[in-house]
Amino acid sequence: HIFSDSDSASKSVAKEIADLIRKNNQASKPTILGLATGSSPKKVYQELIRIHREEGLSFKDVITFNLDEYHPMEPDSIQSYVRFMKEQLFDHIDIPVTNYHLPDGTLSLDKIPEFCRDYEAKIERLGGFDYYLLGIGRNGHIGFNEPGSTINSKTRLMTLDIATKIDASPDFGGLQKVPKKAITLGIDSIMKSKKIVLLAWGEHKADSVAKAVEGTVTSDIPASYLQLHPNASFILDETAASML
Ligand code: GLP
């Protein structure tokens, strides 16, 4: 879906999420959402906050799981995804603190495998994701599933690709300060979502978007796996769609 700009695209995505939550609230069913950080979903979150404030949409029965977190990372650090999600969304809506989940960047290495298994098990016990909101890295990654990740990859500690570290370096004040690793939800859990929506804005995303949408399905571009999903959409502005 190609929109003239990211504002109108974000509003349309937020409306779709709000409609899903409203429908589930009416049926007294929880809504299981997968969420992403980064600049791409920011306007969607702003619009969801507006809908909560102005239209009274309740998030009390919304349960969320984020894609990823740097490791090591303290939750109150400026670059932490926990902090990002609180500032951009959770602190402004009525979601209970116990309903949102992010990978834990403070775990010691030996505790990570068990944490990752539990994270996936929780999602599965809830019946999997109703809706997953994704961004895309310039190298075609989704979450921190870097090039080379297989379609059945599990939630795990991942070594960050050099392109990812370069893109993150302004946030950390230099390449050397970017964490070398991150915990990411695996492609397997993302692919089990009933619906997947990937957002991409700007010319710098055009190449990876074109490869993901029109190229061969390959581990070199993890977002290309979405071609194999029955209900996945790419929501683009004109510049991100310019190489299609
Ligand atoms: C990071 C995150 C991804 C995100 C990507 C794109 O690497 N781990 O989940 O999708 O960046 O970020 P942005 O939306 O800022 O372009």
Image (spheres, rainbow, N blue to C red):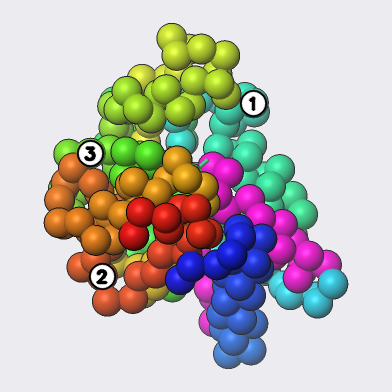
Q: Is residue 1 shown left or right of residue 216?
A: right
Who's the residue at 69% across and 65% down the image? 48
Q: Which residue is mark 1?
A: 78
Answer with mark 3 or mark 2, whichever residue precedes in sequence: 3
Q: Which residue is mark 3?
A: 147
Q: Amino acid at mark 2?
A: His
Measure the C-alpha gap from mark 3 to mark 2.
19 Å
Is the C-beta separation of discs 3 and 2 under 8 Å? no
Q: Nearer the viewer, residue 241 or 23?
A: 241
Distance between the alpha carbons at the discs numbered 1 and 2 = 35 Å
Q: In the displayed image of the protein, which residue is found farthest to the front?
A: 242
Quadrant housing residue 232: bottom left
The quarter of the picture where the C terminus appears is bottom left
Give the residues in magenta.
28-53
Q: Residue furthest right?
A: 54
What residue is shown with label 2?
A: 229
Describe residue 216's horizontal placement relative to residue 115 as left or right: left
Task: Give the quadrant of residue 162.
Answer: top left
